[in-house]
Image (spheres, grey):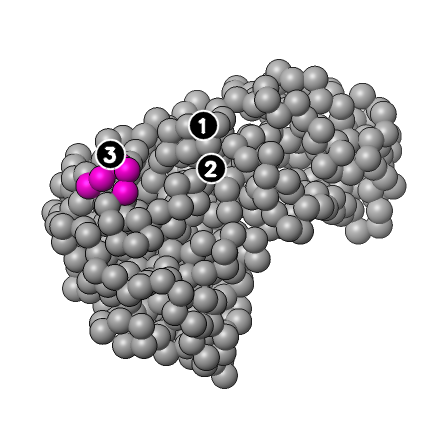
Amino acid sequence: MKRSHSPILAGLALGLALAPLADAQTVYGVTNNPDIYLTEWAGPPSGPCLYPNGDVLNVFGVNIPFFCPTVNPLPHPPATPLGDVAIDKHKDIAYVTDGVVLSAHEATTGVPLFGIQIAGIYMPGPLTGLGFDTAAQTVWITDGQFVAEIAVPSCGVPGPLLTGPFLTPSPGRLLDLDWDPTTGTLYGVDDMGFLTNITTIGGIGATGVAPIAPTACLNALGTMVTGIAVDTGTGNAVNPGLALYATDGFNVFYLDPFGGPAAPQFYTPTNCYPVPLVAQPVSGLAFSARPITYGTGFDPSSSVWPRLGSTGQAVSPHPSGFTIELSSAVPTSPSWLLLDLCALCPAGTWLGGNPLYISFCFPFTPIGPLIVPAGGAISLPTGPIPPTFEGLSLYMQWVVDKPGPGWQVTNGLEMTFSLP
């Protein structure tokens, strides 16, 4: 195992054609309870191993004093369909609207970046939904009646109108929409409980119009479906079945484009689950390609164990890539990053009783040895990600050969190279 290897894309030379079914990552929701904030969650943890870790990963306010406009509190649904979030997966930026303002925030902290007063500029009413086309760097917006595409704005300055506005072809008033990079179309949900595939010229797309509410999962608000998000880790050659998330504010339904349940995956072990309590009632959804953790690390002689994490989002293609990170490891120790195509549940035991979270179902060469510097942290940049990685799921664990007897091991990390 103790062989050197070049960082990280070289180490991911991978044998991509042998990848298993893809998994995705996290979901964002926008909530007002009592102030407006974002919640990011994964899972929820399920099954005998309670994979993945979660469910709540991050909560932060977005009503923050700033020299540009930022969003303000909004009433709970169903009193209003306003409020939504969309994610730029390259720059890790969250776009948030309260219907009147569109503001951009760092997607892991909520720090405001810029914002505009948007209501009435491109269409008559306040916004009910947002979608973000990461590859094109454009924002899709709706007021429930009209749909339009705009360029990314700057502080107080609206972006140019690029497409539309055109009337929605959905049966009812749109309460949310999202961009699907796989088909180059939009998916929207309306106040009559329908999911509509919408083309960029206002027609009905290939998957048509499908009823999704009320269902056994989405029934808290009758036909009021307040959020939709496209899972961009699906709908590719590795995992051809496109999947989406819908919410009525209190439950999340993982569904296919025809309104039926989608097959559960590692990242979403059930196709129906409650919105995390802190985020209820949620007003809009967005998908993030952020890698997720599972299991816990271990050090047989210490209560402090190393952690495996990441910064950025695993999308393919990606102009700059993201980083894989080790923290809280013993300095001066040699370490190796192990890669696999399969998670191990239940966890195995190795290296003197430490938990093993990958199954060695594919013979990747470990990346290392990498000497842990002072401070106990290592950051491995992937570099630019080519489009050929789309749909690949990887499982990782870092091991540390600390001085003296025993090894340190981290939690597991799952990532999927999703479309931007």
Could you tell me which residue is drawn at 19 percent across and 38 percent down? 210
Q: Say whether residue 195 is magenta.
A: no
Could you tell me which residue is drawn at 80 percent across and 21 percent down? 1
Residue that numbered label 2 is attached to: 233
SS of the residue under disc 1: loop
Q: Label 3 near label 1: C-beta < 8 Å?
A: no
Query: What type of secondary structure mainly makes up the magenta span?
Result: strand
Q: Label 2 near label 1: C-beta < 8 Å?
A: yes
Q: Give the vertical position of 364 relative to 181 (above or below).
A: above
SS of the residue under disc 3: loop
Residue that numbered label 1 is attached to: 239
Left or right: 94 in relation to 347: left
Q: Tag 2 or tag 3, which sits nearer the N-term?
A: 2
- Identify the mark at residue 258; answer none if there is no mark: 3
Q: Toward the viewer: 193 or 318?
A: 318
Name the residue type under label 3: Phe
* 10 Å crowding of disc 3: few (<14), some (14-19), many (20+): some
Magenta-highlighted residues: 205-209
The residues bearing labels 1 and 3 have C-alpha atoms spaced at a distance of 17 Å
Residue 330: give x, y in percent of width and height: 80, 41
Q: Tag 2 or tag 1, which sits nearer the N-term?
A: 2
Left or right: 163 in relation to 301: left
Q: Residue furthest bottom?
A: 67
Q: Say whether residue 208 is magenta.
A: yes
Q: Toward the viewer: 242 or 206?
A: 206
Left or right: 167 in relation to 349: left
Residue 60: give x, y in percent of width and height: 46, 62
Q: Quadrant of residue 92?
A: bottom right
Could you tell me which residue is drawn at 27 percent across and 42 percent down? 205
- Identify the mark at residue 119; answer none if there is no mark: none
SS of the residue under disc 2: loop
Name the residue type under label 2: Gly
